[in-house]
Amino acid sequence: MPRVSLKSAWLGVVFAAASAQIGRAVDVAPPAKTAVEQVDRLGDPLPQEALVRLGTLRFQPPQCVNDMVLSPDGKTLVTIGGLIVVFDTATGKQRWEANANESGYESHGSRYGGCGLAFASHGRWLYMPSHRDEVTLWDVFTGHQRILSIHPGNHLYRSVAVSPDGRKLALGGAEQLIVCDTQGTLLFEIKNDQHGGVTKDRNDRLAFDGHYSAGWFSPDRKTLAVVTSDRPDVVRLVDSETGGERSRVALANRLVRLAFSPDGKRIAATERDNAVRLYAADTGKPVWSHIIKLTNIYENYTSCVTFSPDNKIVAVGATDNRIYFCDAATGNEIARLSGHRWYPWGLAFTSDGRILYSAGLDGTIRRWDVAARTQLPPPTGVHGSEVVAASPDGQTLAYADDFGHVHVVDAKDGSERRTLNRPDVNYSQLAFSPDGRRLAGGAAGAGEVHTVVWDVKTGDVVCRFHWPLGRDPHSNVEAFSFSPDGKRLAAAVFRQGAAYVFDLVNGIRIARLKHSQIYGLSFSPDGRTLATAGWDSTIRLIDTDTWKTRVQTKINDGDARMYAVCYAGEGGWLATAHMDGKVRIWNAADLQRLHLFDVPAHFIYGAMSVSPDSLWLATGGISGEVSLWDPMTGEKVWDVGRHRGYVYTVGFGRDSRTLVSGGDDHVDYLWSLRPAGNLPTGDPHALWDSLTGSNGSAAYQALWALSETPKIAMDLINERAPKLIRPLIDHKEGEPTVAVRCVLALLSQLGTPEARHLLKEWVERSAGAKFGTAASAALSRMRPAAGPSPK
């Protein structure tokens, strides 16, 4: 079932300020918790710590889709991958989900053979092959299940079809295809003579699951079309009552998927040579052949196929991520539908033929207006993506939707301010300039890589750069970094092995820096260095005056391929995120390693970011975890929240009170970083000791606790901070310690006139020193006014 999260009301730390004195223990009972359901703008439940959801979960399975079916009445749509997910078509809301693998379904992904789901004729029960000699029947309204045992036998089945009258099942496995009744009694079987491998081409991913068989019932239920892996280019048409063979269809190539026409007179087949072909069902003779020109350098094939109810259109999916409409009479191509980001593997027309549903490996259910040949939005909301960014002041968010639009929204409630777009591109990166006035978008489309820079206030395009994709159709921008002055923008293109640097003042490209398999890059705080890192396990520090490599380090221990590199704004260090789930902290001057720690969730993309105060490191994991770490100790200080799939993007706002993240569940979240529940109470001196101590988790809790009691916090700072900072002010040398940076972060969080005055005083007294620079940075990050924490 979909998770419904309840969020407790924020519980502040209550100090009796009127009577409490520094040094006196204060313990006040917290107010009683009030369970409050947090929902997004559409009324759908939010995860516990989320403030805003960008994009909708309507028609959004949490994983890639291997198969999809639409109920006969059109009211229910079901997808399957690792999960079986059931949606209401009127609203797009998820009714329930279940772990398909735990139910015995083997999630094989794209493969030869039939579908792993089938509806009964009345549309209430869904059939799914499960454990050996079993079929699970799911009630699509309640999620309840029944088990149908198949007898006799000892087989595991992968495909299922239900006859139009609902009286028979066709179950396909590696050894045979059987037809049974709805009590599981075997009626007949067709053996699959398994000789050697399925295919001689070991690079054929569709064959990785081994031998298979599959069946499809004709609309009049009298005929069963059967394909077996021992004869992959032959469709046998057999009597559905006896199994007796009536005729054969000799295909031109190996069958991928098959569909009967609504009148049962034709069979459409997608075949492994990039073709869709039509055959006469009675004679098996070819009617027409349409080969789709596919140029994917990795693999090419046509996948799913279906007829429109009026028998006029054959719809076909392909590995160029498109859906093709062919004229059912002639085979001529009449339309192309673009929008999927990865191979479509499920197609279904509504009974009136007006809407086509599609789904595939990109994990989004799409609806298409058949007459207009355009993609429709979900019934409510906007399909988002994994691409999101927060402005430096934390007040504005930008995210890319599934249609190639970029939405600029208010961080308080997600209300839209502006929509930006360029036709026919999909955005892979977004980044705000340091002053928040510009937004950069990296994208691919129309055979080119694109970098666009907009004026956030007006929506006007300030600069646009574009260049050919090259040989690899998957070339795209994997990382962005603005220089601190906002005048330069660097973009990493992994598939082209290069970092591109653009001068935004003059609108020109000023450098193309080769770095094999580059995945991340980051400008240093002074803008004099550009760090690049990638899957070659190499970090480079490049001088931004000469564009020559100043320092280079190749890492040889473990799987050191890198997804991201991030400079800390203060403290003189940078961090790298590695394929094996390790984070390495480096001295920013000479790349000497300072620390190494594990992120158990591992990385899948460049989901790592350093907080503006350089105290914390945020990461996103392969299983959806969003976490906060002390980079100097490797200690996890807070579990922020969770996506339903890989996390691609994490990023802080200015004051480190919120974090944005984007995942492959195609939604983005703005998270509150305030720890949930009760913060520590008691002796304020103990909180100070925690704030300035070596325990990162305790310091994080104390920072939040003190930030919510401004008077007590200021009294503590005035009493105990001088001992920490006096050497830095008197001698005007030395790097501020982590403890000092925690104090500066606390002042910045407080945002009171007293805190502002003290920071200004420290800046003036230590002008030109590293402490003065750190105090000035804290002053610039200061919240406009004191107030309660988010939520």
Image (spheres, helix red, strand yellow):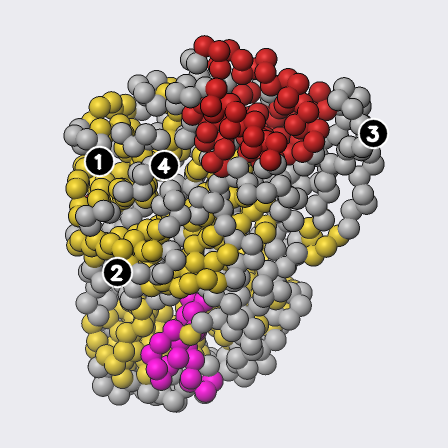
- Residue toward you, 562 or 313: 562
Of callouts 3 and 1, which one flags the residue occurring earlier in the amino acid sequence?
Answer: 3
Residue type, mark 1 in image: His
> Which label is found at residue 19?
3
Residue 147 screen position, x and y as percent: 63, 64
The residue sitting at 30% across, 64% down in the picture is 422
* CA–CA distance in space, label 3 to label 1: 62 Å
Residue type, mark 4 in image: Ala
Disc 3 versus disc 2: nearer the observer: 3
Residue type, mark 2 in image: Gly
* CA–CA distance in space, label 3 to label 2: 65 Å
Residue 781 screen position, x and y as percent: 49, 37
Residue type, mark 3 in image: Ser
Is 652 situated above or below 189?
above
Q: Do tag 2 and tag 1 residues touch (Cβ < 8 Å)?
A: no
Tell whether 224 sits left or right of 680: left
> Which label is found at residue 217?
none
Determine the image quadrant of residue 420: bottom left
- Residue topped by disc 2: 445
Q: Is residue 356 magenta?
A: yes
The residue sitting at 41% across, 30% down in the picture is 568
Chain part drawn in magenta = 351-375
Residue 563 screen position, x and y as percent: 36, 38
- Residue toward you, 103 or 66: 66
Q: What secondary structure is marked by label 3? A: loop
Of callouts 3 and 4, which one flags the residue occurring earlier in the amino acid sequence?
Answer: 3
Q: What secondary structure is marked by label 4? A: strand
- Residue topped by disc 4: 564
> Which label is found at residue 515?
1
Q: What secondary structure is marked by label 2? A: strand
| Location of the N terminus (image quadrant) | bottom right
- Residue toward you, 162 or 741: 741
